[in-house]
Image (cartoon, helix red, strand yellow):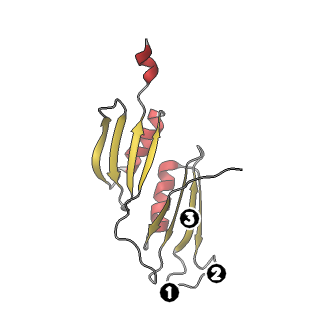
Amino acid sequence: MSIALTPYLGFRDNAREALEFYHSVLGGELTLTTFADGGMEVGEGEGAKIMHGQLTATNGLMLMGADTPSSMRLADESNITVSLSGDDEATLTGYWERLSEGATVLDPLRQAPWGDQFGMLRDRFGTAWLVNISANRADDQG
């Protein structure tokens, strides 16, 4: 048995663009299903919108998302933040740099008071991200 907790992002009209962007950042496999593919009835012209998108990165990260049909309410702003953390500095710095393209950087990626590198941004699709790169504590145990 296993359980996973996966961020599922909501968009109005740009889920495909956003998920393709996240795919360019995280790599892996991206699967997109439109409302038409899923046999869902939506408003006129909305059949090509994304009913479900799933990005599975080769390192196990997963991110999902979909368009919200015009008949449904979409929250103006989410209080959810996607957090990327670990000790793989090169990979996490690369994610930060690609996510920063067109983003509003709220706190630049830099050494934080607790010793890690930390940064916050809101990407060009409105999704908030935190990146925390753990300090190499092994060097401090000399």
Amino acid type of disc 3?
A: Gly
Q: Residue drawn 55% across and 48% down?
A: 61
Q: Are marks 2 and 3 in contact (CB under 8 Å)?
A: no
Residue pointed to by mark 3: 53
Which label's residue is closer to the chain start, 1 or 3? 1
Amino acid type of disc 1?
A: Gly
Looking at the rendered structure, which numbered label has been put on residue 39?
Answer: 2
Q: CA distance from mark 1 to mark 3?
A: 19 Å
Q: Residue drawn 64% across and 52% down?
A: 3
Q: Residue drawn 54% across and 55% down?
A: 6
Q: Secondary structure at mark 3?
A: strand
Q: Are marks 2 and 1 in contact (CB under 8 Å)?
A: no
Looking at the rendered structure, which numbered label has been put on residue 43?
Answer: 1
Q: Position of residue 19 (x, y in %)?
A: 49, 61
Within-10-Å neighbours for mark 3: few <14, some 14–19, many 20+? many
Looking at the rendered structure, which numbered label has been put on residue 90?
Answer: none
